[in-house]
Amino acid sequence: MDTWKAFDANELTHSAAHHLLAIHEVGAAYGGWARVSDIARQLNITRGSVSINLRSLKTRGWVETDEHRLVKLSPEGLKIVQSIMAKRLIVKTFLHDVLGIAESDAEIDSCKIEHLISHRTGQRLVQFVRFLTSDAPASRQVLKQFRRVQTTCPDDHTCEVCKGQCLIDELKRAI
Amino acid sequence: MSSNVRSSKRPDGSSLTRDITDDLNRLMAEEVEACLRYFHMRLRLRDCDHAIAEPFFDEAIKETMEHATAIAAQIRSLGEVPTLRVNLTLGGGRVRLEAALAEALDVEQQALDAYTDLLPRVVDDPALAEFIRKQVEIETEHVRAIREFAAAKGTMKLVPTTSKTDG
């Protein structure tokens, strides 16, 4: 029941993830080195905020700085960025290619959870998407049928997924 | 703070002016954020550090807001309306003076870098260039003062007796 608390305790916060990604992106053209001002522009926040946030990334050993206050990902930081990017891609692929979510929405939602799911879940998701999108007839059939299906709920709300509370109705109300 | 703000508006609507206005808006946000950080940092100081650091943070809060106001005036003199975008959540527990000063040094150094970066881009506008040049001097002095104070671990007076922001 306390799983939600794990988000606060998550070592890699959403902010940290985006700082690391920004350093990676901005530094790509400069041998990995990025200026604080460019990171700030990329994230649309102030240089002061970037500088303060970099302190904790540096403490964790995820970034390195030089005497010109340029910033670079450490090998550990680069590994984290690569895993975030991989998870973002697989979540987006799952949402878009399998569930049929619009690409722009899939991009936003994958960005929200990319750093929160475990590596193991990410790996299983890759396997699942590969299975579903493979050329195997069974996979193609499942995907085809899923895309055709229009979910209708039984009146007594006793389907095996919802177990007494219609989740589709709940989500419709929330939209 | 510079008082050398022109009353006449420049009718130049070029993209360069737009870029400079964007940079000034960012600088204003830096100053406002710094002000809020100092306000919050003062509240986080350990009791034993509070007395010694209070004058510094009081002065820093006042100066950063003065700087933000002066930048806003510069933006208005360019014929634009200032846009303030601040995205800040401040938390954390008690903090030692050394850590607070290290954070203040980061913030001041970034402000100094931002003013320094902007300076070559405004040389065609003597009044604005003069304002930015003065800000570079002020921020350079702030960085120096914080470094010295941190090095002396509170054994020197941090806040100068005469304001360095008059200008």
Image: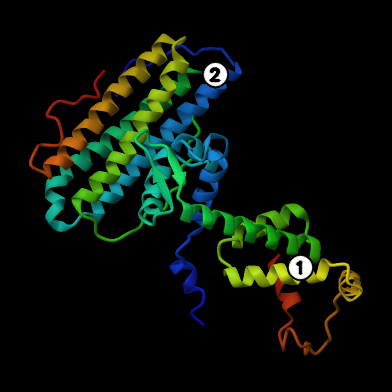
In terms of secondary structure, where does tag 2 sit? helix
Q: What is the quadrant of residue B18 in the picture?
A: top right
Decide which of A99, B19 is in the foreground and name it.
Answer: A99
Q: Which chain is disc 2 placed on?
A: B
Residue A152 badge = none
* Residue B151 on image: x %, y %: 15, 41
Report whether A69 appears left or right of A105.
Answer: left
* Residue B91 on image: x %, y %: 35, 57
Q: Mark 2 — residue?
A: B17
- State how the image is colored: rainbow
Decide which of B140, B41 is in the foreground and name it.
Answer: B140
Furthest residue toward left: B155
Q: Which chain is disc 1 placed on?
A: A
Q: Residues within 10 Å of mark 1 (few under 14, many from 20)?
A: some
Alpha carbon separation for disc pair 2 and 1: 50 Å
Q: Residues within 10 Å of mark 2 (few under 14, many from 20)?
A: some
* Residue A35 on image: x %, y %: 46, 35
